[in-house]
Each structure stands twice: as structure tokens, then as C-alpha cells.
């Protein structure tokens, strides 16, 4: 199965080079994999694997990974205290690398919602149960995602952006606007892969996976539900931002090793995803955005 997406910057359709695709196919396509999945997707397995990626031995994987996936490492800072020639002490330190100043910029127009992750995006102006992503829309409803009666009506049938991060991507996520945090809680769950191969086989992944939910009051886009979704072999979801208030572009947190997803829901009629995201979503194709680019507009 090829995973095609549209790269906005390159203005072309591209085929994703999948890290660990054989393992994902085994886990969700084969009988033995399906039997093993109940164990593999347990949180402690991913957390243990994540610990291995923080060991000194994992450092040997860094340069082969960079070369294999053509990562533009000159855009990133080395780990603090390390040289350009030997930039990271472990694979996880490489995985949570930071951009150099000026490598990415957040759109300043207050009417535009900047991309909160560097990722592949699906977007909906008003998510209904009949929509597909290719996951059944009911699994992306506010009720299923938030699991909190206090907030599900606030975001019912509102806009939604889903940003899928691959292992090759920058794995820090950011606030899209100025504002303050109203609520924060964890939804316990499993850690299935968020790869499209897995999503086709198990369409309720986003409703089952472990996730962290923040309810944000923003300056320009009303209330947002900001949901970080864990995935297979994600060692940990780290909330690095301290304090109740935040500014557009501030780092919110990061994922340790693994592919991950950030979902942002809004209030109905407050904003909508950008036109190219809506167009490609209707075709079942994700749109790749760089961090800080326009991902939505105020209505």
C-alpha cells in the first residue's frame, strides 16, 4: 500500500517512505501479528522500547537514519553541549531535535491559524458522523475523542485538523495562538500505530489510543481542544510548557520515539481549515505542512 500525500511547499504529490512499514503490515495484516498486537500495543511495551532509544547504544542509528530519509540536518540544532560532527548522544535526543532560529516562522496574520506541528494534515470544516478520514467520522467526534461530557458539546460539529507525524518528522508541537489553558487531562488507552496501513485495518484507533487533552482559550480562534495521541513505540508524551498562559509559536511539548498524532478541534463556525487541506482531504489525501504555515483561517 502506497501512502500518497500533497507537499504544499514542493507543490506536488509525493509517496511517503515509511519507517518500519514491514512491522506495521505484519502487526495488522497477519494472523500472528494480530495475536501479538494485544501485547505490543500495551503502554509499558512502548515505554520500554522508548527507554532503549535513550541509551547510548542507540546513537549508532542516528546517521544511517538521517541519510536513509534525507533529513536536512543543517536546519536543526545539535544537542546542547555537542558538536555538529557528533550532534546527539542517543536516538531519542536526535528524535526530539530543535529547529535553529529562523528555520521555521509562524504566520503573523491574526486571521490565520498556523500549523502547530510539522506533519501531514487532514482537515474538516464541520465534522459529521458520515465523514471519513479514512477512519469513520464517529471515531473523530468530540464525544469519542475527548471522553469528557464537560467539553464535548463545546466542540460538537466544529472544525478539526489532524496532524500525523512520521518518525522522520520534527516531533515537537506548538501553540497556534496566544491564550490560556482552561483544562488538562489524560485519557488512558492502548498504543496502536497511527500509520494509514493500521488505520485501514483498525478504524477506531484514535478513540482507543492513549491521549492527552488540553482545552485552550485563544485570542483569535475561540476555544480549542488540543489532543496529543500516543502511538506504538512512542516512549512518552512530554508537556514541556510551564504556566497557564502561552503565546503563538511557543513550544507546548514533544513526543519521544515513534510516529504520533496531534488533533485540534474548534468551536463550530469560528474557523475552518485552509482550502488546499479541505480539497485534498475530500480526495482522501493528506497535505504536508511545515511548522508555522497557515493551516486554517478565521471565519
Image (cartoon, grey):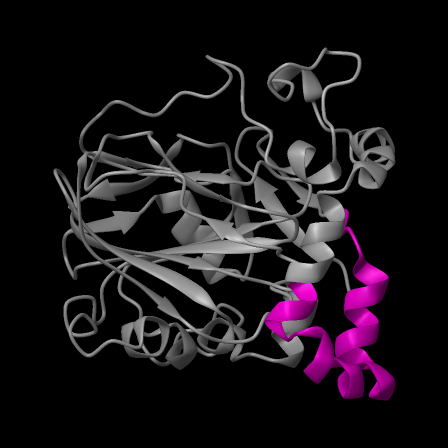
Please give the name of the residue rendered at 64% of the width and 48% of the height, measured from the top-left corner: 166
Q: Is residue 3 in sight in this rendering?
A: no
Front in this rendered view, residue 274 or 231: 231
Question: Residue 248 lies in magenta, yes or no?
Answer: no
Q: Main secondary structure of the magenta part?
A: helix
Find the magenta span and give its range. 17-46
Whether residue 5 sits left or right of residue 124 in the image: it is: right
Which image quadrant for residue 46?
bottom right
Task: Look at 14% across and 67% down and name the residue there.
Answer: 154
* Res. 235 visible in picture: yes
Of the pair 47 and 262, the residue shown nearer to us? 47
**The quarter of the displayed image where residue 2 is located:** bottom right
Q: Nearer the viewer, residue 15 or 85?
A: 85
Query: Looking at the picture, does residue 75 appear above or below residue 244?
Result: above
In the image, is residue 250 above or below residue 283? Answer: above
Q: Is residue 145 left or right of residue 229?
A: left
- Counting labels gives 0
Q: Does the magenta run of residues contain 41?
A: yes
Give the residue at x 78% y 17%.
86
| Residue 243 rendering spot, x and y as whole percentages | 23, 39
Residue shown at the point (51%, 38%) measured from the top left: 118
Q: Is residue 198 left or right of residue 183?
A: right
Query: x, y percentage for residue 194?
Result: 60, 64
In x, y percent, where is residue 52? 76, 50
Q: Quadrant of the N terminus?
A: bottom right
Q: Is residue 134 found left or right of 175 in the rendered image? A: right
Compared to residue 21, the image places residue 59 above or below, namely: above
Amino acid at each position: 500500500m502506497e501512502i500518497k500525500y500533497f507537499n504544499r511547499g514542493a507543490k506536488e504529490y509525493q509517496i511517503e517512505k515509511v519507517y518500519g512499514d514491514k512491522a506495521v503490515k505484519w502487526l495488522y495484516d497477519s494472523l500472528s501479528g494480530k495475536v501479538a498486537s494485544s501485547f505490543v500495543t500495551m503502554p509499558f511495551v512502548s515505554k520500554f522500547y522508548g527507554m532503549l532509544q535513550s541509551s547510548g547504544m542507540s546513537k549508532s542509528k542516528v546517521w544511517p537514519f538521517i541519510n536513509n530519509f534525507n533529513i536536512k540536518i543543517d536546519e536543526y540544532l545539535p544537542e546542547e553541549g555537542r558538536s555538529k560532527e557528533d550532534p546527539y548522544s542517543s536516538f531519542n535526543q536526535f528524535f526530539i531535535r530543535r529547529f535553529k532560529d529562523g528555520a521555521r516562522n509562524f504566520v503573523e496574520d491574526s486571521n490565520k491559524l498556523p500549523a502547530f506541528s510539522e506533519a501531514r494534515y487532514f482537515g474538516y470544516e464541520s465534522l459529521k458522523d458520515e465523514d471519513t478520514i479514512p477512519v469513520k467520522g464517529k471515531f473523530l467526534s468530540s464525544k469519542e475523542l475527548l471522553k469528557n461530557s464537560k467539553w464535548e458539546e463545546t466542540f460538537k460539529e466544529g472544525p478539526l485538523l489532524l496532524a500525523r507525524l512520521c518518525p522522520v518528522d520534527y516531533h515537537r508541537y506548538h501553540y497556534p495562538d496566544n491564550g490560556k489553558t482552561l483544562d488538562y487531562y489524560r485519557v488512558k488507552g492502548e498504543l496502536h500505530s497511527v500509520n494509514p496501513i493500521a488505520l485501514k485495518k483498525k478504524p477506531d484507533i484514535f478513540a482507543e489510543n492513549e491521549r492527552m487533552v488540553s482545552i485552550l482559550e485563544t485570542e483569535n480562534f475561540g476555544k480549542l481542544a488540543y489532543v496529543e495521541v500516543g502511538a506504538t513505540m512512542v516512549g512518552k508524551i512530554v508537556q514541556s510548557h510551564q504556566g497557564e498562559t502561552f503565546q503563538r509559536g511557543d513550544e507546548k511539548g514533544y513526543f519521544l520515539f515513534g510516529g504520533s498524532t496531534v488533533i485540534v478541534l474548534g468551536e463550530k463556525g469560528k474557523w475552518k481549515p485552509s482550502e488546499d487541506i479541505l480539497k485534498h482531504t475530500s480526495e482522501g489525501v493528506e497535505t504536508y505542512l511545515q511548522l508555522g504555515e497557515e493551516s486554517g483561517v478565521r471565519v
